[in-house]
Image: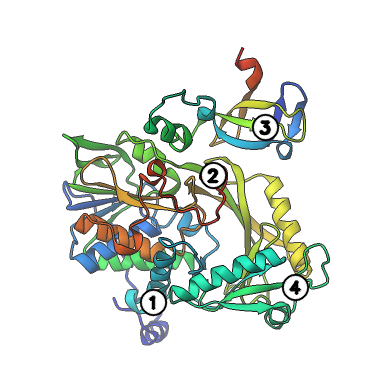
Amino acid sequence: MRLTCPLCGERDRREFYYYGAEDYLHRPGEGASLAEWDSYLHLRDNVAGVVRDLWYHEAGCAQWLVVTRNTVTHEISGVELVAERAK
Amino acid sequence: MRYSGLKVITEGLFGNRGWTPAWRDPAPKAEYDVIIIGGGGHGLSTAYYLAKNHGITNVAVLEKGYLGGGNVGRNTTIVRANYFLPGNSEFYSHSLKLWEGLEAELNYNVMHSQRGLINLFHSDGQRDAFVRRGNAMINQGDDAILLDRDGVREHLPYLDFDNTRFPIYGGLLHPRGGTARHDAVAWGYARGADRRGVDLIQNCEVTGIDIQGGKVVGVQTTRGAIRARRVGIVVAGRSSQVAAMAGMRLPIESHVLQAFVTEGLKPVINHVVSFGMGHFYISQSDKGGLVFGGDLDFYASYAARGNLPMVEHVMEAGMTLMPMIGRAKVLRSWGGIMDMTPDGSPIIDRTHVEGLFIDCGWNYGGFKAVPASGWCMAHLMATGEPHEVARKFRLDRFATGHLLDEEGTGSQHNLH
């Protein structure tokens, strides 16, 4: 598996750390209920197909990335910077 | 038909013409008392114990492919009871006891071989952790023997004891640990369940779960609708998809775990051995192949194959520990889809829908749990109450904080 980092180009999977589903970007705000925290931390759609998840370019530019990929075929269709996305 | 040594001999003398299929191939009926979704190890053992322990025989097991075609046919066959935490410890202890009587129970040769399992340690800190684990195992009534370096050498003379980077300090021997023939476990339970009247229905994919007024009333399948007041979801890596049919979102992320087997060799590795400083464990099958594996690929995946970095890591770790295997040729590698929970422990519980139960989250350790998982899931579905040894495998424990984090690494999806 190779990921194309927007800053570094196409790199081996070993340079990246997988964090988990995109859900981690949607941290509950102050005063959120326990159910919202449980959902944020633990519950997942766990889709067999196209997903968006968070990867960290640990051995490269140290940027957090949102990777769009297919969990059945391992095909990668997009890699964006979390920083750019937040703008 | 009852199997016996005499039967094998007489059939051999008469051209093996007398064998009959081990189970029927029934068409689904319109209604059952209980439906089990998933015809793998856990689903089949659940059906077996529903019939055997609770007298509930009007049961259907619905399998979208063929029986035992999932993880029970794809694992590295290790059977052990070396858990530490209350909640896990009694459960796996119960499972190992069931394994020890399984062949007589099922009248089926599951080739359970208690060849001993040795977890190696390579530092003082690891030794302390294994002493503690061994004491927990002994307190549970199971067996554990702490081996020093020379003790390990007696059992495993072929390890690289000269390795200075990862010196072998000793190992924790679990004599009752070992391996079993993975497919045979599924087949044995399937045959046992069928003989007690359970309908095993293959090529029957569940496409929907029918719920009325908060109660389950049946399922939709590719072979039509089937009614039942009690339904169990026992589908391992596909748990999230089936649970979603009942409107649930599970604390599960499915990951791929790879395993490998070499060409057949003469007997050389007599135990199950795990390396403490890299992801590598190994045993030798009765056919002679070295069966070994490592850790997850560490990304969510439903592809039943992995990537090369973990292959490389496992091979490197194996060569570091036991250089003698370097000349064996790898015959094949494969991947299985693991239903990973945030704390690394399983779930056997009711759901928010009355009559709907779930048995999932077996992470990469489901094989050894097959007997006790079925035992406890059957108990839950028959009585409505969790079995004593599985009472901590709750679905809501992540929300309430009652975690079962055996590794002590935290409760987060990428940590186990």
Which three-letter amino acid code belongs to the residue tagged 1? Glu
Mark yes or no: residue B196 visible.
no
Circle on res. A56: 3
Q: Determine the CA span between mark 3 and mark 2.
A: 18 Å
Left or right of residue A9, residue B363 in this image: left
Q: Nearer the viewer, mark 3 or mark 4?
A: 3
- Give the residue pinned by disc 2: B255
User: Observer-nearest residue: A18 or B188?
Assistant: A18
**Nearer-N-terminus badge (1/4):** 1
Q: Nearer the viewer, mark 1 or mark 4?
A: 4
Q: Please report, as a chain letter, where disc 3 is located.
A: A
**x and y percent of residue B128 in the render?**
63, 68
Q: Determine the CA span between mark 2 and mark 4.
A: 31 Å
Question: In percent of the image, x 49 and y 49: which residue is there?
Answer: B343
**Nearer-N-terminus badge (2/1):** 1
Q: Nearer the viewer, mark 3 or mark 2?
A: 3
- Give the residue pinned by disc 4: B159
User: Observer-nearest residue: B63 or A84?
Assistant: A84
Q: Nearer the viewer, mark 1 or mark 3?
A: 3
Say how many tags the image has: 4
Q: Please report, as a chain letter, where disc 4 is located.
A: B
Q: Please report, as a chain letter, where disc 1 is located.
A: B
Which three-letter amino acid code belongs to the residue tagged 3? Tyr
Position above or below: B251 against B325: above
Crowding near the residue tagged with mark 2, few <14, some 14–19, many ≥20 C-alpha atoms within 10 Å: many
| Same subunit, tags 1 and 3 | no
Question: In percent of the image, x 32 and y 35: which residue is there?
Answer: B245
**x and y percent of residue A19 in the render?**
60, 36
**Nearer-N-terminus badge (2/4):** 4
